[in-house]
Image (cartoon, rainbow, N blue to C red):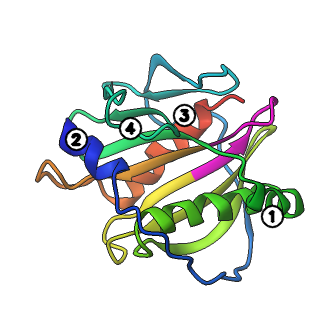
């Protein structure tokens, strides 16, 4: 388990600023109901202002000693090929203007830049930033890869009623030696997780 936690949250600490990427924005309406069976175990933020469910059969990892302060929870599937990572996005002074000007898209850009810094610039945006709508709930959504596109992390950001910002990510893992679920299955899982998010 320590290897899994390490591979998810302890990348290089070098700071590299990636060039700003201009991209078209897509709005996507998603089903407000999960497409797979979900667990009844709650992922809850420390402030209690956002909750989510993880897929049935997934288990929480103990991240108290290894995780950064931003990590709320990490859950993995039984095969250790996918993980669900819920984290907070600190409100840095430098990012407030971008978030105020662009809303969820600005928040998505701020979250992505955090991944770029933590990966020493190896993380690359895949596709475009988008707005996902599930009923009345809205998310800024983007995909990125630190492996040249071989493994794609899917991320969604939101802001709670208390003004706190969070990111929910589906991260493929290559630590078990087993095949990662195909892209269509990962999309189904990611959409199902988002369908359970309440903020």
Residue identifier under label 3: 34
> Which of the numbered marks, if any, corresponds to residue 67?
4
Q: x, y (%) of residue 86?
A: 51, 38
Residue identifier under label 2: 80
Residue lying at the far left of the rendered structure = 177
Query: Circle 2: is it few (<14), some (14-19), or many (20+) Cα within 10 Å?
Result: many
**Cα gap from disc 2 to disc 4, whole angstroms:** 18 Å
**Cα gap from disc 3 to disc 2, whole angstroms:** 21 Å
- Relative to 146, say whether 7 is above or below: above
**Cα gap from disc 3 to disc 1, whole angstroms:** 32 Å
Sequence-first disc among 2 and 4: 4
Query: Circle 1: is it few (<14), some (14-19), or many (20+) Cα within 10 Å?
Result: some
Q: Secondary structure at mark 2?
A: loop
Range shown magenta: 156-166
- Relative to 67, say whether 151 is above or below: below
Q: Nearer the viewer, residue 65 or 194?
A: 65
Q: Secondary structure at mark 4?
A: loop
């Amino acid at each position: 388990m320590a290897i899994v936690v390490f591979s998810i949250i302890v990348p290089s600490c070098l700071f590299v600023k990636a060039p700003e990427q201009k991209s078209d924005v897509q709005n996507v309406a998603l089903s407000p109901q999960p497409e797979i069976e979900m667990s009844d175990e709650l992922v809850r933020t420390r402030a209690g202002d956002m909750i989510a469910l993880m897929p049935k059969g997934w288990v929480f990892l103990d991240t108290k000693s290894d995780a950064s302060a931003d990590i709320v929870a990490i859950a993995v599937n039984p095969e250790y090929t996918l993980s669900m990572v819920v984290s907070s996005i600190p409100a840095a002074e430098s990012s407030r203007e971008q978030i105020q000007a662009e809303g969820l898209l600005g928040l998505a850009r701020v979250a992505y830049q955090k991944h770029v810094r933590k990966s020493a610039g190896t993380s690359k945006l895949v596709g475009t930033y988008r707005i996902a709508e599930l009923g009345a709930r809205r998310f800024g959504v983007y995909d990125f890869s630190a492996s040249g596109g071989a493994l794609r992390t899917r991320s969604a950001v939101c802001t709670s009623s208390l003004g706190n910002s969070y990111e929910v990510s589906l991260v493929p893992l290559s630590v078990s030696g087993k095949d990662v679920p195909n892209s269509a299955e990962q999309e189904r899982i990611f959409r199902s997780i988002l369908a359970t998010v309440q903020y």
